[in-house]
Image: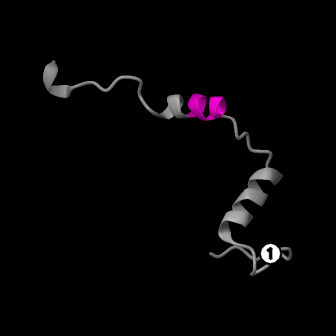
């Protein structure tokens, strides 16, 4: 089901501009440290070789 369009969406804004605007509204953290913390939570620090066991 499609989301209803917001009244303030203007067709002349690019996707990038809308993305940045939404991120700012949500107060998204842009720091590299925050990215690294989140990245380390989802990516294993060491890849195990299954054939080495």
- Residue that protrudes farthest toward the top in the picture: 53
Q: Does the magenta run of residues contain 5?
A: no
- Residue that protrudes farthest toward the right in the picture: 8
Q: Position of residue 47 (x, y in %)?
A: 31, 26
Q: Which class describes the residues within 10 Å of circle 1: few (<14), some (14-19), or many (20+)?
A: few
Q: Quadrant of residue 14?
A: bottom right
Find the magenta span and give its range: 32-38
Question: Pointer 1: what residue?
Answer: 9
Identified at 49% across, 34% down, the residue is: 42
- Which element is circle 1 on? loop
Q: Position of residue 49 (x, y in %)?
A: 21, 26
Identified at 80% across, 45% down, the residue is: 27
Q: Is residue 8 left or right of residue 35?
A: right
Q: Quadrant of residue 44?
A: top left
Reply above or below: 51 against 16: above
Q: Does the magenta run of residues contain 33?
A: yes
Q: Which is the main secondary structure of the residues drawn in magenta?
A: helix
């Amino acid at each position: 089901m499609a989301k209803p369009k917001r009244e303030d969406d203007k067709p002349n804004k690019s996707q990038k501009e809308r993305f940045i605007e939404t991120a700012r509204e949500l107060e998204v953290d842009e720091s590299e440290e925050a990215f690294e913390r989140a990245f380390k939570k989802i990516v294993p620090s060491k890849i195990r070789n299954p054939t080495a066991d």
